[in-house]
Amino acid sequence: MTGAPAAARRRVVVIGIGNEFRRDDGVGPEVLARLQERADPVQAGPVQADPVELVSSDGEPASLIEAWTGAALAVVVDAVLADPPVPGRLHRLALDRLTTDVRPVSSHGLGLGEAIGLARALGRMPDRLIIHAVEAADVGHGVGFTPAVAAAVAPLTAAVLRDLP
């Protein structure tokens, strides 16, 4: 058996948002790097799963929408600031096309929430969108994670892997 025809395959994309030169904000690219390391060895066996597309993003809404358009599943990985903060705490939010809670969309200062609203308005949402986030302690200039976020990278990567087909 040769597997499903190309048209029947379901596109999966993981989007890592962040800037590795802004301390904890680099967690999205770090998770992508760990996923890439896992994907590098060739898998043995006659049938291989469709590859998961890994996309690095600075979080600009138009590039997010472009990356997830047409995907059956899009997984977004990002750092977030919370009040009160609990650095290293993980969050997971799953949305599908039928989710109706949409915030107003602005053309200025767009973020992930606004990108979701805009993608819905344009009919460019993936079939399913899962957001994995870790609470950051420091997003100032510099490299390297704070201890709490560094400790959360492996569990965050594992959480993303659990959501992949």
Image (cartoon, rainbow, N blue to C red):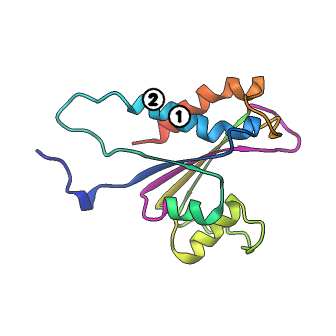
Query: Residue 123 colored magenta?
Result: no
Mark 2 and mark 1 residues within 8 Å of each other at the beta carbon: yes
Region in magenta: 68-88
Q: Give left or right: position of 69 versus 102.
A: left
Q: Give left or right: position of 122 versus 3.
A: right
Which residue bears the numbered disc 2? 37
| Among the 4 quarters of the image, the one containing residue 25 | top right
Compared to residue 136, the image places residue 116 above or below, namely below
Q: Give left or right: position of 158 versus 61.
A: left
Q: Name which residue type carries label 2.
A: Glu
Label 2 vs label 1: CA separation?
A: 6 Å
Label 2: element kind: helix
- Quadrant where the image shows the N terminus: top left
Q: Name which residue type carries label 1.
A: Ala
Compared to residue 119, the image places residue 129 above or below, namely above
Query: Residue 33 has which mark?
Result: 1
**Residue lying at 46% horizontally and 34% vertically, measured from the top left:** 36
Residue with the most extreme right position: 84
